[in-house]
Protein backbone atom coordinates (compact mmCIF):
# COMPACT_ATOMS: atom_id res chain seq x y z
CA UNK A 1 0.00 0.00 0.00
CA UNK A 2 1.43 3.39 -0.99
CA UNK A 3 1.80 5.74 2.00
CA UNK A 4 0.89 9.43 1.86
CA UNK A 5 4.55 10.39 2.21
CA UNK A 6 5.80 8.07 -0.52
CA UNK A 7 6.62 10.14 -3.59
CA UNK A 8 9.19 7.73 -4.96
CA UNK A 9 9.07 7.42 -8.74
CA UNK A 10 10.93 4.16 -8.85
CA UNK A 11 13.85 5.83 -10.58
CA UNK A 12 15.78 6.86 -7.49
CA UNK A 13 16.89 10.44 -7.04
CA UNK A 14 18.46 10.36 -10.47
CA UNK A 15 14.97 10.54 -11.89
CA UNK A 16 13.99 13.62 -9.94
CA UNK A 17 14.49 16.83 -11.87
CA UNK A 18 15.13 19.04 -8.81
CA UNK A 19 17.53 16.68 -7.05
CA UNK A 20 19.79 13.80 -7.93
CA UNK A 21 22.13 13.33 -10.81
CA UNK A 22 19.70 14.48 -13.45
CA UNK A 23 19.78 17.89 -11.84
CA UNK A 24 23.45 18.36 -12.67
CA UNK A 25 22.83 20.64 -15.61
CA UNK A 26 25.21 21.79 -18.31
CA UNK A 27 27.96 23.96 -16.88
CA UNK A 28 27.98 22.21 -13.48
CA UNK A 29 30.90 19.94 -12.54
CA UNK A 30 30.61 16.48 -14.05
CA UNK A 31 32.12 14.89 -10.92
CA UNK A 32 30.40 14.28 -7.61
CA UNK A 33 31.89 15.43 -4.32
CA UNK A 34 31.97 12.71 -1.67
CA UNK A 35 29.89 12.89 1.48
CA UNK A 36 32.35 14.16 4.14
CA UNK A 37 34.02 11.51 6.28
CA UNK A 38 33.10 13.35 9.48
CA UNK A 39 31.83 16.54 11.07
CA UNK A 40 31.61 17.92 14.58
CA UNK A 41 28.35 19.17 15.98
CA UNK A 42 29.55 21.32 18.86
CA UNK A 43 31.79 18.96 20.80
CA UNK A 44 30.27 15.78 19.39
CA UNK A 45 32.20 14.03 16.59
CA UNK A 46 29.97 12.44 13.94
CA UNK A 47 31.53 9.94 11.53
CA UNK A 48 30.63 9.44 8.74
CA UNK A 49 28.65 12.62 8.02
CA UNK A 50 25.36 10.79 7.59
CA UNK A 51 22.25 11.10 9.75
CA UNK A 52 19.22 8.83 10.06
CA UNK A 53 16.25 11.24 9.93
CA UNK A 54 13.81 11.22 12.83
CA UNK A 55 10.62 9.43 11.73
CA UNK A 56 7.62 9.01 14.01
CA UNK A 57 6.50 5.41 14.11
CA UNK A 58 9.73 4.25 12.43
CA UNK A 59 12.90 5.30 14.27
CA UNK A 60 12.32 3.54 17.58
CA UNK A 61 15.24 1.98 19.44
CA UNK A 62 14.93 -1.31 17.51
CA UNK A 63 15.12 0.34 14.09
CA UNK A 64 17.85 2.75 15.18
CA UNK A 65 20.08 -0.04 16.49
CA UNK A 66 19.39 -2.13 13.39
CA UNK A 67 20.62 0.76 11.23
CA UNK A 68 23.59 1.47 13.49
CA UNK A 69 24.66 -2.16 13.40
CA UNK A 70 24.47 -2.29 9.61
CA UNK A 71 27.09 0.48 9.58
CA UNK A 72 27.57 3.77 7.75
CA UNK A 73 25.35 5.89 9.98
CA UNK A 74 27.04 8.72 11.88
CA UNK A 75 24.11 10.02 13.90
CA UNK A 76 20.73 8.64 14.87
CA UNK A 77 17.76 10.56 16.24
CA UNK A 78 14.66 9.67 18.22
CA UNK A 79 11.25 10.24 16.67
CA UNK A 80 9.79 13.63 17.63
CA UNK A 81 8.64 13.74 21.24
CA UNK A 82 6.29 16.17 22.93
CA UNK A 83 8.11 18.38 25.45
CA UNK A 84 4.84 18.77 27.36
CA UNK A 85 4.33 15.00 27.27
CA UNK A 86 7.72 14.03 28.71
CA UNK A 87 7.23 16.41 31.63
CA UNK A 88 3.79 15.02 32.49
CA UNK A 89 4.35 12.42 35.19
CA UNK A 90 1.62 10.16 33.86
CA UNK A 91 2.62 10.26 30.19
CA UNK A 92 4.60 7.01 30.01
CA UNK A 93 4.18 6.84 26.21
CA UNK A 94 6.10 10.08 25.63
CA UNK A 95 8.88 8.86 27.94
CA UNK A 96 9.14 5.60 26.00
CA UNK A 97 10.15 7.60 22.93
CA UNK A 98 13.24 8.73 24.85
CA UNK A 99 14.43 5.25 25.72
CA UNK A 100 17.76 4.31 24.18
CA UNK A 101 20.66 1.88 24.65
CA UNK A 102 24.37 2.52 25.08
CA UNK A 103 25.23 1.28 21.58
CA UNK A 104 23.13 4.10 20.09
CA UNK A 105 25.66 6.86 20.90
CA UNK A 106 25.97 9.40 19.38
CA UNK A 107 22.22 9.94 19.55
CA UNK A 108 20.04 13.04 19.45
CA UNK A 109 16.63 13.48 21.10
CA UNK A 110 14.12 15.46 19.08
CA UNK A 111 11.54 17.55 20.95
CA UNK A 112 8.58 19.61 19.79
CA UNK A 113 6.58 22.23 21.62
CA UNK A 114 5.99 25.95 21.68
CA UNK A 115 6.46 27.08 25.28
CA UNK A 116 10.11 28.15 25.85
CA UNK A 117 10.04 27.23 29.55
CA UNK A 118 8.60 23.78 28.90
CA UNK A 119 11.06 23.22 26.05
CA UNK A 120 13.98 24.22 28.31
CA UNK A 121 12.86 21.87 31.07
CA UNK A 122 12.36 18.99 28.63
CA UNK A 123 15.83 19.65 27.16
CA UNK A 124 17.31 19.44 30.66
CA UNK A 125 15.57 16.10 31.13
CA UNK A 126 16.99 14.89 27.81
CA UNK A 127 20.49 15.94 28.88
CA UNK A 128 20.04 14.13 32.18
CA UNK A 129 19.08 10.94 30.33
CA UNK A 130 22.50 10.97 28.63
CA UNK A 131 21.62 12.07 25.08
CA UNK A 132 24.54 13.57 23.14
CA UNK A 133 22.42 16.25 21.45
CA UNK A 134 18.97 17.79 21.67
CA UNK A 135 17.04 18.87 18.56
CA UNK A 136 14.02 21.11 18.04
CA UNK A 137 11.42 20.02 15.48
CA UNK A 138 10.17 22.85 13.27
CA UNK A 139 9.15 20.66 10.39
CA UNK A 140 6.21 18.48 11.35
CA UNK A 141 3.29 19.32 9.03
CA UNK A 142 0.67 17.29 10.99
CA UNK A 143 -2.46 19.34 11.75
CA UNK A 144 -2.68 18.27 15.40
CA UNK A 145 0.91 19.46 16.02
CA UNK A 146 0.60 22.68 13.99
CA UNK A 147 -2.67 23.54 15.77
CA UNK A 148 -0.76 23.82 19.08
CA UNK A 149 1.90 25.95 17.36
CA UNK A 150 4.38 23.05 17.32
CA UNK A 151 6.42 21.69 14.42
CA UNK A 152 6.14 23.72 11.21
CA UNK A 153 3.39 25.86 12.79
CA UNK A 154 6.12 27.95 14.40
CA UNK A 155 7.66 28.81 11.02
CA UNK A 156 5.22 31.72 10.83
CA UNK A 157 6.41 33.18 14.12
CA UNK A 158 10.18 33.73 14.11
CA UNK A 159 10.22 35.78 17.35
CA UNK A 160 8.58 32.83 19.16
CA UNK A 161 11.26 30.53 17.73
CA UNK A 162 13.94 32.94 18.97
CA UNK A 163 12.59 32.66 22.52
CA UNK A 164 12.71 28.85 22.38
CA UNK A 165 16.25 28.96 20.97
CA UNK A 166 17.43 31.17 23.82
CA UNK A 167 15.65 29.26 26.59
CA UNK A 168 16.88 25.84 25.49
CA UNK A 169 20.42 27.05 24.76
CA UNK A 170 20.67 28.47 28.27
CA UNK A 171 19.25 25.31 29.84
CA UNK A 172 21.69 22.66 28.54
CA UNK A 173 25.39 22.10 27.87
CA UNK A 174 24.93 19.44 25.17
CA UNK A 175 24.82 20.76 21.58
CA UNK A 176 21.40 22.06 20.57
CA UNK A 177 20.28 21.76 16.94
CA UNK A 178 17.14 22.49 14.91
CA UNK A 179 15.49 20.65 12.01
CA UNK A 180 13.10 22.69 9.93
CA UNK A 181 11.30 23.10 6.63
CA UNK A 182 12.00 26.06 4.34
CA UNK A 183 8.86 27.93 5.33
CA UNK A 184 5.10 27.68 5.44
CA UNK A 185 4.67 28.03 1.67
CA UNK A 186 6.46 29.47 -1.37
CA UNK A 187 5.40 33.00 -0.38
CA UNK A 188 6.84 32.65 3.14
CA UNK A 189 10.33 31.18 2.80
CA UNK A 190 12.18 31.80 6.07
CA UNK A 191 14.94 29.18 6.03
CA UNK A 192 17.91 31.54 5.60
CA UNK A 193 16.68 33.94 8.28
CA UNK A 194 15.97 31.02 10.58
CA UNK A 195 19.40 29.48 10.06
CA UNK A 196 21.05 32.84 10.83
CA UNK A 197 18.98 33.18 13.98
CA UNK A 198 19.95 29.66 15.05
CA UNK A 199 23.63 30.51 14.60
CA UNK A 200 23.41 33.77 16.50
CA UNK A 201 21.55 32.06 19.38
CA UNK A 202 24.38 29.52 19.75
CA UNK A 203 22.83 26.46 18.12
CA UNK A 204 25.44 23.95 16.97
CA UNK A 205 23.96 22.85 13.61
CA UNK A 206 20.86 23.16 11.44
CA UNK A 207 19.09 20.53 9.33
CA UNK A 208 16.80 21.50 6.47
CA UNK A 209 14.12 19.32 4.91
CA UNK A 210 14.04 21.29 1.68
CA UNK A 211 10.27 21.52 1.29
CA UNK A 212 7.65 23.92 2.60
CA UNK A 213 4.91 22.93 5.01
CA UNK A 214 2.37 23.28 2.21
CA UNK A 215 4.30 20.85 0.01
CA UNK A 216 3.94 18.10 2.59
CA UNK A 217 5.88 15.27 0.95
CA UNK A 218 4.89 16.13 -2.61
CA UNK A 219 7.01 17.51 -5.42
CA UNK A 220 10.79 17.47 -5.34
CA UNK A 221 12.92 18.72 -2.47
CA UNK A 222 14.41 22.12 -3.43
CA UNK A 223 18.10 21.59 -2.71
CA UNK A 224 18.88 25.18 -3.68
CA UNK A 225 17.43 26.17 -0.29
CA UNK A 226 20.07 24.00 1.42
CA UNK A 227 22.76 25.77 -0.65
CA UNK A 228 21.35 29.17 0.38
CA UNK A 229 21.61 28.25 4.07
CA UNK A 230 25.11 26.90 3.62
CA UNK A 231 26.11 30.27 2.12
CA UNK A 232 24.54 32.14 5.04
CA UNK A 233 25.95 30.40 8.14
CA UNK A 234 29.20 28.90 9.43
CA UNK A 235 27.67 26.22 11.67
CA UNK A 236 27.26 22.77 10.07
CA UNK A 237 24.33 22.40 7.66
CA UNK A 238 22.68 19.01 7.29
CA UNK A 239 20.82 18.54 4.00
CA UNK A 240 17.64 16.47 3.82
CA UNK A 241 15.12 15.52 1.16
CA UNK A 242 14.84 12.89 -1.56
CA UNK A 243 18.12 11.02 -1.14
CA UNK A 244 17.43 7.53 -2.46
CA UNK A 245 20.86 6.35 -3.64
CA UNK A 246 24.55 6.93 -2.77
CA UNK A 247 24.81 9.01 -5.95
CA UNK A 248 21.97 11.22 -4.71
CA UNK A 249 23.85 11.77 -1.42
CA UNK A 250 26.97 12.89 -3.30
CA UNK A 251 24.87 15.00 -5.70
CA UNK A 252 23.37 16.85 -2.73
CA UNK A 253 26.85 17.54 -1.30
CA UNK A 254 28.06 18.65 -4.75
CA UNK A 255 25.14 20.97 -5.39
CA UNK A 256 24.73 22.47 -1.91
CA UNK A 257 28.09 22.12 -0.11
CA UNK A 258 26.22 20.69 2.91
CA UNK A 259 28.29 19.25 5.74
CA UNK A 260 26.23 16.08 6.20
CA UNK A 261 23.31 14.30 4.58
CA UNK A 262 20.17 13.09 6.32
CA UNK A 263 18.22 10.07 5.05
CA UNK A 264 14.55 9.53 5.86
CA UNK A 265 12.08 7.49 3.82
CA UNK A 266 14.66 5.48 1.94
CA UNK A 267 15.87 3.85 5.18
CA UNK A 268 12.73 1.80 6.00
CA UNK A 269 12.54 0.47 2.44
CA UNK A 270 16.30 0.02 2.05
CA UNK A 271 17.96 -0.16 5.51
CA UNK A 272 21.32 -0.72 3.79
CA UNK A 273 21.31 2.79 2.25
CA UNK A 274 23.69 4.36 4.80
CA UNK A 275 26.11 1.45 4.51
CA UNK A 276 25.82 1.65 0.72
CA UNK A 277 26.77 5.34 0.84
CA UNK A 278 29.89 4.45 2.85
CA UNK A 279 30.80 1.59 0.51
CA UNK A 280 30.24 3.86 -2.50
CA UNK A 281 32.67 6.37 -0.96
CA UNK A 282 35.28 3.66 -0.38
CA UNK A 283 34.84 2.76 -4.04
CA UNK A 284 35.35 6.39 -5.09
CA UNK A 285 38.59 6.44 -3.12
CA UNK A 286 39.81 3.13 -4.53
CA UNK A 287 39.19 4.52 -8.02
CA UNK A 288 41.34 7.51 -7.09
CA UNK A 289 38.45 9.88 -6.35
CA UNK A 290 38.61 12.82 -4.01
CA UNK A 291 37.05 11.01 -1.01
CA UNK A 292 38.87 11.12 2.31
CA UNK A 293 37.17 7.96 3.52
CA UNK A 294 39.87 5.55 4.52
CA UNK A 295 38.81 1.99 3.75
CA UNK A 296 39.29 -0.07 6.92
CA UNK A 297 41.46 -3.18 6.91
CA UNK A 298 39.74 -6.49 6.09
CA UNK A 299 39.83 -7.43 9.78
CA UNK A 300 37.94 -4.28 10.73
CA UNK A 301 35.38 -4.63 7.96
CA UNK A 302 33.27 -7.08 10.00
CA UNK A 303 29.67 -6.99 8.86
CA UNK A 304 30.54 -4.92 5.79
CA UNK A 305 31.99 -7.94 4.04
C1 LIG B 1 6.67 8.40 8.59
C2 LIG B 1 7.45 9.67 8.79
C3 LIG B 1 7.61 10.19 10.05
C4 LIG B 1 8.36 11.37 10.24
N1 LIG B 1 8.56 11.84 11.51
C5 LIG B 1 9.36 12.91 11.71
C6 LIG B 1 9.71 13.33 13.02
O1 LIG B 1 9.31 12.73 14.02
N2 LIG B 1 10.52 14.42 13.14
C7 LIG B 1 11.00 15.10 12.04
O2 LIG B 1 11.75 16.08 12.20
N3 LIG B 1 10.71 14.70 10.79
C8 LIG B 1 9.92 13.63 10.61
N4 LIG B 1 9.69 13.18 9.33
C9 LIG B 1 10.36 13.86 8.21
C10 LIG B 1 11.70 13.18 7.90
O3 LIG B 1 12.57 13.28 9.01
C11 LIG B 1 12.37 13.82 6.67
O4 LIG B 1 12.59 15.17 6.93
C12 LIG B 1 11.53 13.68 5.40
O5 LIG B 1 11.02 12.37 5.27
C13 LIG B 1 12.34 14.06 4.15
O6 LIG B 1 13.47 13.27 4.02
P1 LIG B 1 13.52 12.01 2.97
O7 LIG B 1 13.18 12.55 1.63
O8 LIG B 1 14.91 11.47 3.08
O9 LIG B 1 12.46 11.06 3.44
C14 LIG B 1 8.92 12.05 9.12
C15 LIG B 1 8.75 11.51 7.85
C16 LIG B 1 8.03 10.34 7.67
C17 LIG B 1 7.87 9.78 6.29
Image: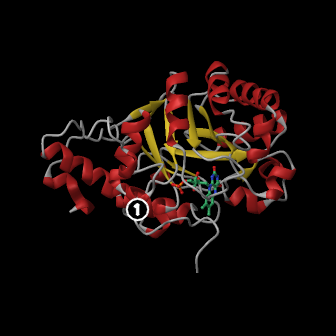
Q: Residues within 10 Å of mark 1 (few under 14, many from 20)?
A: some
Q: Position of residue 20 (x, y in %)?
A: 40, 51
Q: Secondary structure at mark 1?
A: loop
Residue farthest to the top, as pictured: 200
Residue 70 position by quadrant: bottom left
Instruction: Look at 65% across and 41% down and name the residue there.
Output: 180
* Picture residue at 78% right of the left edge, 30% below the top: 158
**In the image, residue 76 above or below residue 206:** below
Which residue is denoted by mark 1 in the rendering? Answer: 12
| 295 lies left or right of 187 | left
Observer able to see residue 12: yes
Q: Nearer the viewer, residue 111 or 185?
A: 185
Q: Nearer the viewer, residue 146 or 128?
A: 146
State the residue at coordinates (44%, 31%): 40
| Rendered view: 250 above or below 97 | above
Relative depth, front residue between 4 and 85: 4
Image quadrant where one finds the N terminus = bottom right
Find residue 195 and report its horizontal and vertical position in percent.
Answer: 62, 28
Find ligand 1 in the image and state its quadrant: bottom right
Q: Position of residue 168 (x, y in %)?
A: 72, 31
Q: Quadrant of the C terminus?
A: bottom left
In the rendered image, is residue 46 in sight?
Answer: no
- Can you say whether 63 is above or below 20 in the image? below
Amino acid sequence: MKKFWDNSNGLGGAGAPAGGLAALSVGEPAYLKPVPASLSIGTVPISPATVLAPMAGVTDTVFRRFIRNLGGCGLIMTEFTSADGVLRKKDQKAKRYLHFYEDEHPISAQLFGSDPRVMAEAARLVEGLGFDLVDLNLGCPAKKVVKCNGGSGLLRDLPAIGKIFEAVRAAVKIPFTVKFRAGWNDEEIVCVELARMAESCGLAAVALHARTREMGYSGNARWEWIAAIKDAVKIPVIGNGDIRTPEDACAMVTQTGCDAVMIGRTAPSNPWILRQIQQYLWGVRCRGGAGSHARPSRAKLGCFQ
